Image (cartoon, grey):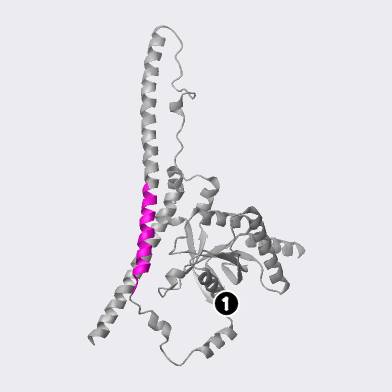
Amino acid sequence: MAGSTARSFLQVAATEEVASPLRVVQIEGLVILKIIKHCKEFSPALVTGQLLGLDVGSVLEVTNCFPFPIREEDEEIEADGANYQLEMMRCLREVNVDNNTVGWYQSTILGSYQTVELIETFMNYQENIRRCVCIIYDPSRSNQGVLALKALKLSDSFMELYRANNFTGEKLREKNLSWVDIFEEIPIKVSNSALISAFMTELESDTPVTQCDYDRLQLSTNPYMERNMEFLIECMDDLSVEQQKFQYYYRNLSRQQSQQQTWLQKRRAENLARKAAGEEPLPEEDPSNPIFKPIPEPSRLESFLITNQISNYCNQINGVAGQSFNRLYLMKALHDK
């Protein structure tokens, strides 16, 4: 009996070690309001904060958050920021509030969040936390009538490559990794307690239309579209620079290969002459020769991130343009009546 109990306990422990994939991020409504308030108060400056909650099976529950103070890039101030986080978590633990770190949130401008800094932050969190997410909130896009809130995590295949710091074309083809496989978007589920849901029902007014509903009929989308186009053009310029790097690399590689072939032909002719004279042939490779030194291939990480960002801007422009046409057709129908 004791042996079967021990075996069952070991089996349970073994099954707990196998982490189930993260399928949904459950956020309390109060946390979303805190994130929106913090990001809008300091907009257009970019802000960030800590997410607290619980990791339960395939669900990551976010039950609380607190903002990080805006600071300059200084070692002493960064140390103060770390102490601030620890002190905040200690205070929350004293009042019996969830103080387990499950990630962080940050604001962005027009969805321009796909950077190397975000990846490095993910990797730093991943060293101490098994599963973490980043909540991205875009105040500028939310002004267009859409709650621009998304939860992101790095894909496992990308993290493996990033740890190896090997983003060559051969390695990417081997792992079958493309630019769309860097980030994974996790569905967000908003959760409220029964008391809050009942209170919100009491607060609902009897009028079917509110001022917020009228705001959605605003026809002016020019500033938003112009900013998206400006950022899109900048990304296209950056992508062109990355392509020039690869063109330069392939030109140098082709030149080196032709030099190697020329040198090899000369060495073979020299070996034929030495063989006819009864001498030992020379080796057909000379590692000390500069033309045999391999040329490092540029990393494709930047081009992947820029391509991801371009796709994001195109999707935003497409979405806003579609909504604008719907509003125009609606206003035309109202005007005709």
- Residue at image mark 1: 30
Q: Quadrant of residue 29?
A: bottom right
Of residues 306 and 222, the one nearer the viewer is 222
| Residue sticking out furthest to the right | 2
Magenta extent: 220-240
Quarter of the C terminus within the rendering:
bottom left
Q: Residue at x 37, y 26 (%)?
A: 259
Of residues 14 and 228, the one nearer the viewer is 228
Relative to 314, say whether 200 is above or below: below
- In the rendering, at what x and y percent does residue 199 appear? 56, 87
| Residue sticking out furthest to the top | 277
Within the magenta stretch, is there residue 232? yes
- In the rendering, at what x and y percent does residue 334 appear? 27, 85
Of residues 261 and 96, the one nearer the viewer is 96
Q: Main secondary structure of the magenta part?
A: helix
Does the rendering let one see residue 56? no
Relative to 144, say whether 112 is above or below: above
- In the rendering, at what x and y percent does residue 331 appear? 28, 81
Other residues around mark 1 within 10 Å, as few (<14) / some (14–19) / many (≥20): some
Relative to 179, say whether 1 is above or below: below
Left or right of 107? Residue 129 is right
Quarter of the N terminus within the rendering:
bottom right
- In the rendering, at what x and y percent does residue 147 appear? 45, 73
Left or right of 196? Residue 260 is left
Q: Residue at x 40, y 73 (%)?
A: 144
Q: What amino acid type is highlighted by mark number 1? A: Leu
Quick one: SS at disc 1? helix
Does the rendering let one see residue 15? yes
| Residue sticking out furthest to the bottom | 206
